Amino acid sequence: MKLGFRSRLLVAAALPAAMVVVLLAIGFLDRYAADLDHALRDRGSAAARQLSLAAEFSLFTGNVDALQRLVAATRQGDPQILAVAVFDRGHESRAATGGFSSIPPDFSGREQLIDAASLIVVTPIRRSALPVDDLYSDVVPAAAVPAQELLGYAVVELSKTGVAKQRAEMLGRILAITVASLLLAILLSTLLAASVTRPIGHISQIVGRIKSGELEARAQPAQAGVMASLAAGINDMAARIAFTQEDLRQQVASATAELRQQKETAEQAARVDSLTGVANRRAFTEVAEVEVQRALRYGTPLSLILIDLDHFKSVNDRYGHHTGDAVLASFARTLTEAVREMDIVGRWGGEEFVVLLPGIGCAEALQVAERMRVTACDSRLYVQGRQILYTASFGVAEFNPSEVSFYGFLARADAALYLAKGNGRNRVEAATNGGPAAG
Amino acid sequence: MILAIAWLLPTCASADDVSIWLALSELGGPYVEAANALRGQLAQTASHRIDVRVGSWQDLAQTPGKPPQLIVAVGASAYRSAIDEGQRVSALADVPVLALLVPRAYYEAQAPKARVPTSAVFLDQPLGRYLDLVRLALPERRRIGVLLGPESSAQSAPLAKAAAARGVPLVSVKVDGEDDLYAGLRSVLADADVLLALPDARVFNAGSLQNILITTYRQRVPLVAFAPGYVKAGAALALYSSPTQAADQAAAMVRAFLGSHALAAPQLPSDFSVAVNERVARSLGLIIADPDDLAEQLRRIEAQR
């Protein structure tokens, strides 16, 4: 497209120039050829006239040698002269040099074109009159002495090949000038075209880059040249597009982030107990199922602690639900702080909590439960200026691979908890490592 | 008494006005110069009151009135008109004609036709005067060549006689005209060291003059001619009588006619002038004296003779 544009500009600039040059050349050549013909004819006439003047006296004296010299000198005087002769009035040749294409020449006219190659000029030789104030001539009738008496003819034949050669030379020169001026025109128009096509090329390249998404691409004013305003416009447009796109992207991103956050919040809400911040029963169950499967697959130990706050109903009754909630939250924090990162704390429901301890056997789990019990017992919780004392009972069970399911496992821990409740509360009891029948 | 009569006669004549016509070949140039000079001379004539009328022949012939006592024809064609046409006009049938500025050969050829008394002051100079001039002006150019054509061949014998009288070697060649002019010229120039041109329209004319001048110039031979125009054209010397000089001579003849009522015989010019082309003379390596001095010396020589 760029080449096409450039060549179109080139033609637009060079074609009129070429046409003008050619028309001028044709007109000039035509005129020049006519001038050359005229000049040749004039040269022939001048040579013949000069010869006729010079030959008059030699013709009068009958000096053939002198005539021959004159004729030879006339021929030598001009390379275009092919032949020269002097004839007397009886049309007899008196002196001649060179070969005439037509002998005898036509004495009637002044000049004749023999063929395309040569031209014959015939000039009469007349006696030049020298009038004298002579009273004797009063008696002589004027007709008696013809003052312009014809003595003979000077004949000159000229070659037209020189003219043809000059014409050819001129044609060649004109052609050379034409070609040179065309080349110049092409050069100039190329330079001119470049001043348009280069900026256009640069701008179209920038547009291409913008199209392919490179919105930060900008046209350089220095390279835009005469198209600077177009480049500026495209830059503005690109900037606006880029701005709009960035704006859209940010809007989309913020909307996406908001959605993600909402989703995460929802998910979190579905899995976390809103009061205590620990896993709710459903989430805990899912994780516990996975950990049971893992313990089954790898044969690693897995322990479960089931916890119930002692006399929690009386706390609620005595201090109100608000205080009860604070106790629950505090206790959940106590549990969370007492376990490892990988351990899972969940609220099973009401004042019941569960803790799953992967990779930990019953003995260690008992120690963990004991630590939790002590911490809960020693905690000094202040709610609305009042110190709240509470305790909890713990049932600990280790996973038995024969159980296969989590619920059997949980049932044994529940049995241990029941045992702890039964044994006076605020204590830790271990479940039997057998089947549920043992609980 | 005789003296008284002699004194009275012109007075009586003056009582009846003398009328003279001056018929001019052309109303210009030398003819008018001659007419003016003649009229001036005649106005000083004490013996008569002369009524001079000047014009072309046609003007004068058509003028009504008394015929003149004398017709002075100034120029050859005026002369021819006077004797040809004058005869056809009865009033002019016996008026004498005095010709002025006419060639001798022409006058003599026309004279037999004339029925009235005629006379003339010729253009032609005496032949001896030419020879004397050449001897005076070009003393070292001893051999005088002459080309005689059909109109001047009659001069051959008188010229030879004049040359012999002066002891001048004369080379005389006769030509028939145009065709043998160059051959004749060459044979004259081969032998002579000065060429004397005598009036002959078949030899010396406007068409031939340039070639003759070139030929003589190339041979380094000076040309001595018979009219001042030749000097202007390139001749070294010319001997001639000016129209005024001829008119003076004619005035004397008119006065004589008024006295005697008879015309004197035709005359060669008594007074003359010399013209020199100094540039041509210098080109030919000649030293020629002042033309007026030459004329004066010539007059002295003729006075002594």
Image (cartoon, grey):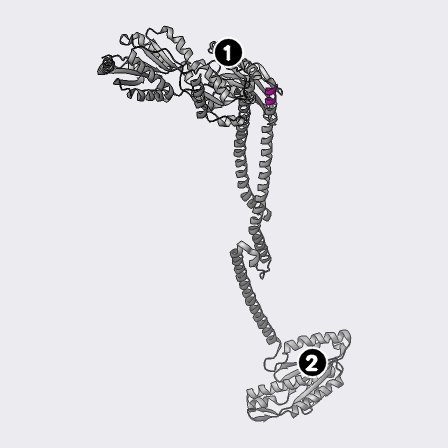
Most common SS among magenta residues? helix
Q: Position of residue A277 (x, y in %)?
A: 61, 81
Number of marks: 2
For the residue pair A341 and B6, the one nearer the viewer reads as B6
Discs 2 and 1 share one subunit:
no
Please state which amino acid type lies under the numbered disc 1: Ala
Q: Which mark is residue B160?
A: 1
Residue A248 seen in the current view: yes
- Highlighted magenta segment, given as a residue range: A65-71
- Which disc, if any, is residue A341? 2
Chain hosting mark 2: A
Mark 1 neighbour density, 10 Å: few (under 14) some (14–19) many (20 or more): some
For the C terminus of chain B, give its image quadrant.
top left
Report the side of A99 relative to B117 (left or right): right
> For the residue marked with disc 2, what is the amino acid?
Glu
- The chain identifier of the residue carrying mark 1 reads B
